[in-house]
Amino acid sequence: MTTPDSDSLLAEQLLRLTRRVHRIQKHHLERSGLGVTPAQARLLRTLAHCDSPPRMADLAERLEVVPRAVTTLVDGLEGSGKVRRVPDPTNRRVIRIELTEDGRKALRQLRGARMSAAEEILDPLTDLERQVLSGLLDALVDGTPERTPKHGQGQRQGQEQGRGQGQGHNC
């Protein structure tokens, strides 16, 4: 049974962990020497999961930011040769954003930096603790409880098919 105090403590721990994750990822990004900000890295990762080059509005929606923020990010990435603006083949007034070869190369390096950051963050945990944390984070991210109360404890139900897998996105 949780209390308001324990929920408040959990919320504070989650916020502190989020700040630590951002700090460590930023440090690893800086060490990579790519000259990519965390927000630009997120945009590159989003592009990599799109089935076809998205419109700026699609990126803004996926990133949950205002379109102007995407324009600024794309300007920076385009200036460094990691993305390019291309006209839509069916409507030349529509501009789409696609990864360049330099962008794909940067993504591979970014994955390495992210893996290093993840290893640093998760280092104190055992394999079992990592599995438990993964299940708990899935439940929190999805916002749907996967447990049914049984004798004061939660019992894990089967995971939904396809959950947690990096499925392609239309963008």
Image (cartoon, grey):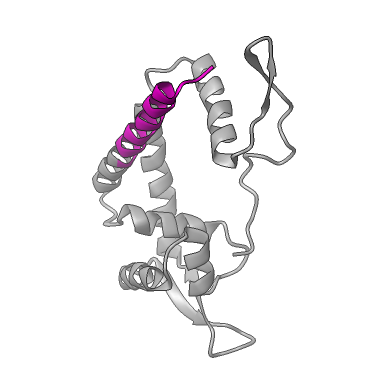
Please state which of residues 109 and 27 is positioned toward the viewer in this rendering.
27
Left or right of 130? Residue 121 is: left
Taking the view exactly as shown, the residue that stands out farthest to the front is: 4
Q: State which region is magenta.
A: 1-22
Taking the view exactly as shown, the residue that stands out farthest to the top is: 151
Residue drawn where x is 47% and y is 59% of the image: 63
Q: Is residue 12 magenta?
A: yes
Q: Position of residue 169 (x, y in %)?
A: 63, 58
Left or right of 150? Residue 73 is: left
Q: Is residue 37 magenta?
A: no
The quadrant of the picture occupied by the N terminus is: top right
Total marks in image: 0
Above/below status of 147 relative to 61? above
Above/below status of 63 relative to 120? below
Left or right of 99? Residue 19 is: left
The quadrant of the picture occupied by the C terminus is: bottom right
Residue drawn where x is 52% and y is 61% of the image: 62
Q: Position of residue 26 (x, y in %)?
A: 28, 45
Please state which of residues 23 and 143 is positioned toward the viewer in this rendering.
143
Residue drawn where x is 50% and y is 22% of the image: 130
Q: Main secondary structure of the magenta part?
A: helix
Left or right of 139? Residue 98 is: left
Q: Position of residue 10 (x, y in %)?
A: 41, 26
